[in-house]
Image: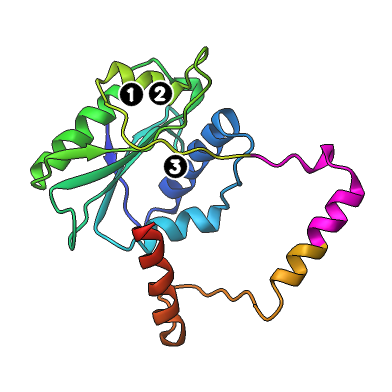
Amino acid sequence: MRIERWVADDPAATRACYEVATAVSTADDPHGPPWSARGFRTWLEQAVEPMEMWFVPGETPGSARAWYHLDLPDLENTDRAGVNLVVHPAFRRHGAGSALLEHAARRAAENGRLVLGSDVMRGPAEAPSAGESFARRAGAVAGLVDARRVFATGRVPPERIALLRENAARAASGYSVVSWVGPTPDRYLSGLAAVFNALNDA
């Protein structure tokens, strides 16, 4: 199976990998937030730590079947690598995921990593997700388990929504929302660091 390395100056490969990510999100995480093409490209091109991305090209030019993104931390946890492995639903159980996992494990080892970790979307006990089933077959061991709740506003009476909005507005008084592209501006660095430290200690 042909596996190619993603490079930032190949917009066709970036688009093809984004389309795979979109198809997977639609199939496996329909309640999750959508990922824009721009956000996906920024995630790849402005990585915070060293990374590699490899993909299995599709049969037609400018398409892909699967890809993986390998994080290689260089400041902390330098014995570890994180892999995000994504296979288009139409090409699952055809060997692409296994080939990419083997490739990722080899690349992690070549970079001196002893542990390869990943995130997996879990399904209900009676119907494990595709990622969960794949991880089990690969011999992965579960570590931390997160829960995400979906608030279906369509089932909440309008008067309850109004009350929640009123309470939120009162609690948010004095705060503002800011955003930026690229490195954090100096004026926000200390506050952002404090938030991250609080989360890491929680």
Q: Position of residue 113 (x, y in %)?
A: 12, 44
In the image, 152 versus 179, the foreground residue is 152
In the image, 87 versus 61, the foreground residue is 87
Asked where in the image residue 103 lies, by quadrant, the reply is top left
- Residue extent of the magenta highlight: 150-165
Q: Position of residue 6 (x, y in %)?
A: 32, 48
In front: mark 2 or mark 3?
A: 2
In the image, residue 89 above or below residue 25? above
In the image, 88 versus 73, the foreground residue is 73
Does residue 182 appear in the picture of this structure?
yes
User: In the rendered structure, which disc, 3 or 1, sits on the residue that comes first in sequence?
Assistant: 3
Q: Which residue is mark 3?
A: 17
Q: Is residue 111 left or right of residue 173?
A: left
Q: Which residue is mark 2?
A: 132
Does residue 1 appear in the picture of this structure?
no
Whole-Å distance between the Cαs marked 2 and 3? 21 Å
User: The disc labelled 1 sits on which kind of residue?
Assistant: Ala
CB of mark 2 within 8 Å of CB of mark 1? Answer: yes
Q: Quadrant of the N terminus?
A: top left
Whole-Å distance between the Cαs marked 3 and 1? 21 Å
Magenta segment, principal secondary structure?
helix
Q: Secondary structure at mark 2?
A: helix
Q: Secondary structure at mark 3?
A: helix
User: The disc labelled 3 sits on which kind of residue?
Assistant: Cys
Q: Which residue is mark 1?
A: 135
